[in-house]
Each structure stands twice: as structure tokens, then as C-alpha cells.
Image: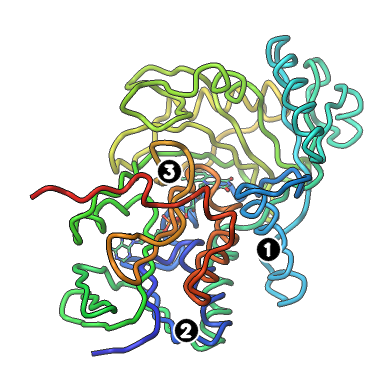
């Protein structure tokens, strides 16, 4: 039996950053992933990092976004890992008068909370990002947003964790969990591990883990998909998105009573277009957007890719001249109320959860890992975690 203070199940950005902070605090950490480190959503995402500032009274969202931004910065600048991080700023295209009204409302609210965000005229925006469409209604600009390479970042967290003594094991699917006294016995096929505290960071697959211990942890798998062009010389400098979906979800957050909030589709029917993307350091332009509830299907819908490419071309017209060279998809962990689940699972001793980060778990993953590691180490959570208490959504499964 292999002993450690903490076992982390899941080698995505949440599990790897938690392992890094736990090992840094001197804990013996064993991280198990059933596939590769960063093999799922954390390695397949667009690499956009969110945040509007700390504001006047930082809550969970600010600790996750701005906390993560600080961690990305320190990984690249202080720890010296080339994760292709840039605090590039972001531009959100405003494509209609309704979107403009919503953007004004949103910006004045965010500013009243002390956030850094403003609306730029199309020509001001073009002075930041020359290839933007100058005929739209405007652009919302935020200087705190950034970007980084998803695989390099997630693997850098696991490298730092390893350097601090953590054992990181890939190809180790967790097949059963059992409480033993106040600790845990974790099995991966015929290997048996023992720990004091267990952290579940299994993203979209968390309900499978819940089933192993008789708990309904209602995380739903939502498919996101992306496309990339060939590498081209630098032509996009910020992260780029559109206000279209935000304005739609502001009015219609739930597309179907059984679905988590803010999806692009209700069954087979599209309800809105969602768009985000950037140009990678290797020159590829990458964009994506759709959010569909399709179980664990990870194929790509070419209709969806076409809709997304047309949308991107409305904002950056030069993209109409480029073709799609590759596509991919990944599965995101959505919670029923749209908020993360980070904290203790009260039904058992020494059981912790960090998931439900939905479509923005790359940018918020490092902060989530830090907060849950802090809870495990100190035994007491940061006050911001009051907003993400897992027990609000977890029920025992009646057998
Ligand atoms: C196409 C796409 C684009 C996105 N774009 C962005 C973006 O631009 N910005 C942003 O912030 N977010 C984005 N996201 C969302 C973000 O990628 C996710 O929210 C985040 O990666 C979730 O991280 P995680 O660590 O919780 O889960 P994951 O990365 O999914 O990691 C969970 C890990 O658990 C492992 N696991 C599962 N079950 C077991 C088991 N039984 N035993 C052992 N291991 C197990 C899996 O193998 C996996 O490696 C995007 C996602 C997708 C799919």
C-alpha cells in the first residue's frame, strides 16, 4: 500500500495546481489521472484567462480569476516556465444595438464595483487590434484578461508539484474509494493507495466518482469544440470574443429546465452563437464557442464549426480568407447553478472537491487549486469559499 497525506484524483489544471500548492506546503501528495496529465479539457481549451480586476469587495469570482492571473504570472515570470502567458487584454465585439445597451449596463455595473473595463469605439478598438471590423457598434475592452498555452501551463503545474516532492501518476484510473477510519483507501485496478485526505478534481467525470461513494454530485458534461487555421504571421494580439451570447444569456440563462445555465443549444436547436479565440504563439488562429449537452460525446459538429467560423469572420474579416486546418472538442464540467463546487464534502471525513468550473476553468483553475489546497492544509477555508460550498448540490444516492 502506498501512503501519502493527500491523494488528488484528476490531472487537469485544477488537480495539478492543487498538487503544486499542497506539495509547496510540505504535504506528501500523490496525484492519479486515468489518462495523460492535461489530457482532457485542461489541455483542449482555448487558453483564455478571464478577470476584470479585484474590485472593491472581492468575492469568489475575483479570487478565482485574479488569483489565477497572479499564479499564471508567477509560473512564467518567477518560476521561469514558458507557458506562453501574456496579459494581452481582451476585446468583446458588440454587434447590435441590443448588445450595445447590454454592454453599457454591464460596464457601468462593473465600474461601480471598481473593475477595469470600458467600451471602445470601433476606431479606438482598431488602434489596439488593427484587423478588427470597424463597422461594428463597438468593443468592450478589459486590460486584465490574458492568455496562455493550456497544455504547457497544466504540465508546468505538475512539474512544479513534482519538484516539490509530489508523485504524479498518469494512466492510473481510480476504480474505487473507501473511507478507512478518517482517511481513505483508493484503488486503481490492482494498485492500492492510502491517504489522510482525498481531493476529487475529476472535471466532467465527477459524477462517476460520486457514484463510487454513494453520492450524487451533479456535474454535467458539456461539449465544447474548436478549430484552428494554419500558422500565419502575428495578426491577432488580444483574446477576442462576442457579446452576442452574453446578451442572450443575460435574458435567457436557462435554455432547458434540465440543463445547466448558459448553453448554446437546446437539444439539437441552436439558441445563440458563442465565440472566443486568439492567435497562439505558433501562429495558429484558434476559435471555438459551442456548448452542448451531449453526454460524453467528443466528436466535432462541422455545422457548429462553420457557424463559429462565420461569426469570427464578422469580427476579424481576414479570417474569411483562411481555411480550417484542424478541429477538436473537449468536455467541460458544468454545475446545475453555474457556480463552482470547491470545498469539503461534508458527508465524509477528509473528502474535498474542486470542480464545476464550466467554460472558464482554465482561467480559474489555478485559483481553485490554491483555495482548496489552503483548505486542506489549514483545515479552514478562505471566506470566499462560502460561495462554492459543494454540499449545496450533493445528495446521498438512495440504494
Ligand atoms: C473546447 C474548450 C474550450 C475552452 N476554453 C476555455 C478558455 O478559453 N478559458 C477557460 O478558462 N476555460 C476554457 N475551457 C474550460 C476549461 O478547459 C475547463 O473548465 C477546465 O479545464 C476544467 O479543468 P479540470 O481540471 O476541472 O478538468 P479536466 O481538465 O477535465 O481534468 C479532469 C481530469 O480527471 C481525470 N479523471 C476523470 N476520472 C478519473 C478517474 N476515475 N481516475 C483518475 N482520473 C480521472 C481525467 O482524465 C482528466 O484529466 C474550455 C473547454 C473546452 C472543452
Residue 18 against residue 63 in the figure, above or below: below
State the image coordinates of residue 278 (x, y, percent, origin top left): 67, 42
Q: Give the mark nearer the N terminus: 2 vs 1.
A: 1
Task: Mark 3 and ligand 1: say if the CB distance to the nearest ligand atom is below 8 Å.
Answer: yes
Q: Of tags 3 and 2, which is closer to the observer?
A: 2
Where is residue 104 shown, x and y percent of the image? 78, 20
Q: Position of residue 163 (x, y in %)?
A: 56, 86
Q: Earlier in the sequence, mark 3 or mark 2?
A: 2
Mark 1 against mark 3, which lies toward the viewer?
Answer: 1
In the picture, measured across the screen, residue 135 lies left or right of residue 336, that is right
Q: Write down the quadrant of residue 254 in the picture.
A: top left
Measured along the vertical axis of the image, is residue 325 above or below residue 344? above
Dot 2 alpha-carbon crowd within 10 angstroms: few under 14, some 14 to 19, many 20 or more? many
Tag 2 residue: 166
Per the model, the C-alpha gap separating discs 3 and 2 is: 30 Å
Q: Residue at x 22, y 73 (%)?
A: 179
Query: Toward the viewer: 183 or 334?
Result: 183
Mark 1 neighbour class, 10 Å CA radius: few under 14, some 14 to 19, many 20 or more: many
Q: Are marks 1 and 3 in contact (CB under 8 Å)?
A: no
Residue ID for mark 1:
72
Q: Is residue 70 left or right of residue 214?
A: right
Mark 3 surroundings within 10 Å by alpha-carbon count, few (fewer than 14), some (14 through 19), many (20 or more): many
Q: Is residue 389 left or right of residue 59?
A: left
* Residue placed most toward the observer, 166 or 235: 166
Residue annotated with mark 3: 329
Q: Farthest residue to the left: give it.
A: 399
Q: Position of residue 392 (x, y in %)?
A: 38, 46
- Residue at position x 64%, y 32% from top? 322
Question: Which element type, helix, strand or loop, lies under badge 3?
Answer: strand
Amino acid at each position: 500500500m502506498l501512503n501519502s497525506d493527500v491523494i488528488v484524483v484528476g490531472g487537469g489544471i485544477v488537480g495539478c495546481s492543487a498538487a503544486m500548492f499542497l506539495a509547496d506546503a510540505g504535504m506528501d501528495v500523490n496525484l492519479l489521472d486515468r489518462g495523460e496529465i492535461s489530457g482532457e479539457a485542461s489541455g483542449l481549451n482555448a487558453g483564455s484567462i478571464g478577470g476584470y480586476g479585484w474590485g472593491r469587495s472581492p468575492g469568489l469570482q475575483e479570487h478565482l480569476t485574479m488569483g489565477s492571473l497572479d499564479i499564471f504570472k508567477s509560473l512564467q515570470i518567477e518560476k521561469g516556465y514558458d507557458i506562453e502567458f501574456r496579459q494581452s487584454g481582451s476585446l468583446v465585439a458588440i454587434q447590435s444595438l441590443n448588445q450595445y445597451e447590454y454592454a453599457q449596463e454591464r460596464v457601468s455595473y462593473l465600474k461601480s464595483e471598481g473593475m477595469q473595463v470600458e467600451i471602445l469605439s470601433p476606431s479606438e478598438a482598431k488602434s489596439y487590434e488593427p484587423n478588427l471590423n470597424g463597422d461594428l457598434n463597438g468593443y468592450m475592452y478589459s486590460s486584465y484578461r490574458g492568455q496562455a498555452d493550456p497544455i504547457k501551463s497544466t504540465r508546468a503545474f505538475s512539474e512544479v508539484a513534482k519538484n516539490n516532492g509530489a508523485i504524479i501518476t498518469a494512466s492510473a484510473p481510480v476504480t474505487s474509494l473507501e473511507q478507512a477510519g478518517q482517511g481513505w483507501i483508493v484503488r486503481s485496478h490492482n494498485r492500492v493507495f492510502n491517504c489522510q485526505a482525498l481531493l476529487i478534481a475529476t472535471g466532467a467525470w465527477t459524477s462517476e466518482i460520486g457514484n463510487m461513494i454513494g453520492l450524487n454530485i451533479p456535474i454535467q458534461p458539456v461539449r465544447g469544440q474548436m478549430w484552428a487555421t494554419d500558422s500565419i504571421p502575428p495578426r491577432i494580439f488580444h483574446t477576442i470574443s462576442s457579446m452576442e451570447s452574453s446578451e442572450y444569456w443575460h435574458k435567457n440563462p436557462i435554455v432547458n429546465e434540465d440543463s445547466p445555465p448558459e448553453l448554446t443549444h437546446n437539444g439539437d436547436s441552436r439558441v445563440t452563437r458563442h465565440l472566443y479565440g486568439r492567435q497562439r504563439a505558433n501562429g495558429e488562429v484558434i476559435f471555438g464557442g459551442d456548448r452542448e449537452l451531449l453526454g460524453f460525446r467528443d466528436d466535432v459538429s462541422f455545422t457548429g464549426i462553420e457557424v463559429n467560423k462565420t461569426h469570427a469572420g464578422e469580427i476579424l474579416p481576414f479570417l474569411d480568407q483562411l481555411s480550417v486546418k484542424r478541429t477538436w472538442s473537449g468536455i467541460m464540467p458544468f454545475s446545475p447553478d453555474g457556480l463552482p463546487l470547491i470545498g469539503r464534502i461534508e458527508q465524509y471525513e477528509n473528502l474535498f472537491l474542486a470542480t464545476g468550473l464550466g467554460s472558464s476553468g482554465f482561467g480559474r483553475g489555478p485559483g481553485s487549486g490554491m483555495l482548496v489546497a489552503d483548505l486542506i492544509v489549514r483545515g479552514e477555508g478562505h471566506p470566499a469559499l462560502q460561495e462554492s460550498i459543494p454540499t449545496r448540490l450533493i445528495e446521498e444516492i438512495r440504494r
